[in-house]
Image (cartoon, helix red, strand yellow):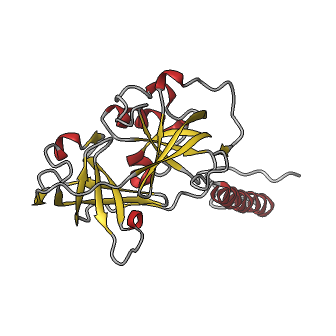
Amino acid sequence: MNDFYVGYQPKAPHALAGFVRRVVVGLGLLAVIVAFVLIFGQLPFANSVFEFGKLRTFEGTIEAQPYPTLLAARPREAAQEEKYSRYLIVAPGKHGAEELVAGFDGKQVSLQGQLIYREGGTMVEISPGSIKLMQADPASRLPTRDLGTVRVTGEIVDSKCYLGVMNPGQGKVHRDCAALCLRGGIPPIFVSSNGESQFLLVGPDGSALSRDALHDFVAETLTIEAELFQTGDRRLLRIDPRNLRHSTGMAQSTLSSNESPAVR
């Protein structure tokens, strides 16, 4: 005779209770295994940091073009172009810092802000009203080197999220956020598909791109052929947004530079 269990009885028959116990334990073990598979199957997060709530004081020279930048001296660096670190400057939220640095171009200042960094790029989210003039005399500017034409495959991202405020700060899931950041004045950067190269995007004349110029191409795999320039430790691609074309599929990661040692 099969075991029969009436719900209001204090205990289930021994055979039925044992079967239910094995099923529950099995499902529990299965859930644990699935959880571990999902955890270890995830792509690792990038080693990026946003020092939220930690105000630092920075000193250096403001460069307003093409995008607000702080040129800070490095101690004990010999080569001219290695004497400085370059920090992109942004405002809180999804906004650029053009208005905050207005009138300080070429001048030495001190300011407070929160550091954002990722291998290959650094940024400061400036605290509004914290910028103070230290020296009004214009500072010497670093020379810009023309490194020739390069062809690179990758993705347009907003620099603030990509460098550390969001993780991951790229890809389709980040498309809407990136579009809003760029529209708010956050500098755009182009990241190669292998993640090893970052390029600040500027217009054909080296000036900042209009805020809506790249809206239709954010978070899309693109292959760009453009002139590469380097100022200090920063590399810039001069592009004409009118020449950008939507990809027909996922392009293979490539990065060529006519054997230029500046692109790796």
Residue 153 visible, this orientation = no
Where residue 89 appears, x then y in whole percent? 29, 50
Judge from the rendering whether residue 159 lies leftward or rightward of residue 168; answer left or right: left
Judge from the rendering whether residue 121 lies leftward or rightward of residue 44; answer left or right: left
Q: Residue at x 54, y 57 (%)?
A: 45
Q: Nearer the viewer, residue 162 or 45?
A: 162
Where residue 184 appears, x then y in whole percent? 30, 34
As drawn, the residue found furthest toward the right would be: 1
Q: Nearer the viewer, residue 211 or 40?
A: 211
Where residue 216 appears, x then y in whole percent? 48, 24
Vertical placement of residue 246 versus 261, above or below = above
As drawn, the residue found furthest toward the top would be: 242
Vertical placement of residue 138 versus 56, above or below = above
The image quarter containing residue 71 is bottom left
As drawn, the residue found furthest toward the bottom would be: 76
Residue 158 visible, this orientation = yes
Q: Residue at x 63, y 58 (%)?
A: 39
Q: Residue at x 62, y 51 (%)?
A: 260
Judge from the rendering whether residue 28 lies leftward or rightward of residue 207; answer left or right: right
The image quarter containing residue 264 is bottom right
Q: Residue at x 69, y 33 (%)?
A: 250
Q: Nearer the viewer, residue 9 or 42?
A: 42
Q: Nearer the viewer, residue 19 or 241?
A: 241
How many callouts does the rendering have?
A: 0
Where residue 263 appears, x then y in whole percent? 59, 52
Judge from the rendering whether residue 129 lies leftward or rightward of residue 30; answer left or right: left
